[in-house]
Image (cartoon, rainbow, N blue to C red):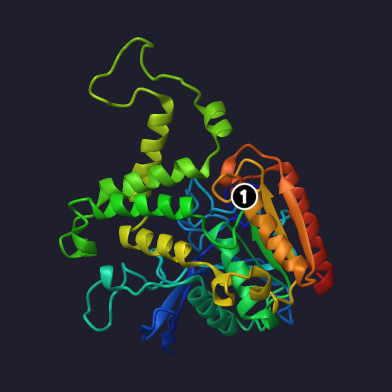
Amino acid sequence: MSGPFPEDSVGLVTPRTVHFDEPLSLDSGRMLPGYTLAYETYGELNADASNAVLVCHALSGSHHAAGYNAPDERKPGWWEACIGPGKPLDTNRFFIVCSNNLGGCHGSTGPTTSNPETGEAYGADFPLVTVRDWVRSQARLADHLGIPRWAAVAGGSLGGMQALQWAIDLPERLAHAIVIAAAPRLSAQNIAFNEVARQAIRSDPDFREGRYAATGDRPRTGLMLARMLGHITYLSEAAMGEKFGRDRRGEPNDYGFNYDVEFEVESYLRHQGQSFVDRFDANTYLLMTRALDYFDPASACGGDLAEALRGVTAPCFIASFTSDWRFPPAASREIVRALLDTNKRVSYAEIRANHGHDAFLMPVPRYREVFTTYMQRVAAEVGV
């Protein structure tokens, strides 16, 4: 590692891709004739491939979970707080793998990639995918990398849901499940937030029923509004109050009748929305939020979550944050109760933090402490 990187960073990382020619059957009943996954790895795989950890990303994440893709990159990967030397996912001990979910827009096959049947971008024709579909695609990636069993599968938010689905669907292929700031299913309120975001995108005149790639336009305004709405739900009232309060950008009595930016929080949200448009795809946002809506493993068991988790064999680490109102601690405790009802091994931490849902991305001291302690147990089991 070289360059002006922090000592606890993995440093410069080169993304990779792998193409799978074998068709993938999807929960929707459709089939992908083949697909590509983009991924990054950090650390070294040991001789018996026992130290590998799969990291699953959340809705707007990607395979770039840690380090930097260029020497002058200003912002590191999305889970830099937890991946690197001496961090909970310690790259001196573990071989970390993170892939861009199928249907993503950062190198994996999705709406922005070419449909082999037409030679044009899939766009709105890309099939809906589910968390179970992602698990199946990631299992093939593990096979490609020569990893028969993960030491752990870890993720926060939608990534935590993937970790839980791994434990349900392929219990023999992971030793531990790390489920952070997640839920066993979305509440009606969460589905409602997702629907408002989708309608913001679909109502944009430039959306063109998802076929905007043909015109060169993009539904920038709709996607920006969707991100602004989502970002509000990722923060807590306390965090927003502490960061912005009612601070104004102009004079206190300079009443703005053109509804331009006046409050600092308005400026922040607009910046978040505008920067998101430059790095994300609208069709992918629709697809990812719908995958969130569909996640409900208990539905296959008449709503009985304990029954859905009966086949889980991996010990589970569950963590939640007190100020997370999007996926509140009660949702994590529901998973914990269901695991205990069938005598599963589970560790639970409820972290006091005022950052809201985004706390799982941040270096909250108590969070890092309990996460590190659990991963030290995992490391001891595999002898690294």
| Residue 360 percent coordinates (x, y) | 62, 50
60 versus 237 height, above or below: below
Identified at 45% across, 43% down, the residue is: 231
Secondary structure of the residue carrying numbered label 1: helix
Where does label 1 land, which residue?
360
Instruction: Count residues near mark 1 (Cα–Cα under 10 Å), then give few for <14, some for 14-19, many for 20+.
Output: many
| Residue 369 percent coordinates (x, y) | 77, 49
When asked about the image quadrant of residue 97, the answer is bottom right
Image quadrant in which the C terminus is located: bottom right
Name, please, the residue furthest toward the top. 253
| Residue 302 percent coordinates (x, y) | 57, 74
Instruction: Name the foreground residue: 224 vs 55.
Output: 224
297 versus 118 height, above or below: above
Instruction: Name the foreground residue: 73 vs 363.
Output: 363
As shown in the figure, which amino acid type bears the numbered disc 1? Phe
Tell whether 106 sits left or right of 314.
left
Instruction: Name the foreground residue: 382 vs 333.
Output: 333
Name, please, the residue furthest toward the front. 302
Identified at 35% across, 9% down, the residue is: 253
The mark tally for this picture is 1
| Residue 147 percent coordinates (x, y) | 65, 81
Image quadrant in which the N terminus is located: bottom right
Name, please, the residue furthest toward the left. 215
Tell whether 314 sits left or right of 27.
right
Tell whether 170 sits left or right of 204.
right
34 versus 123 height, above or below: below
Instruction: Name the foreground residue: 15 vs 32.
Output: 32
When asked about the image quadrant of residue 318, the answer is bottom right
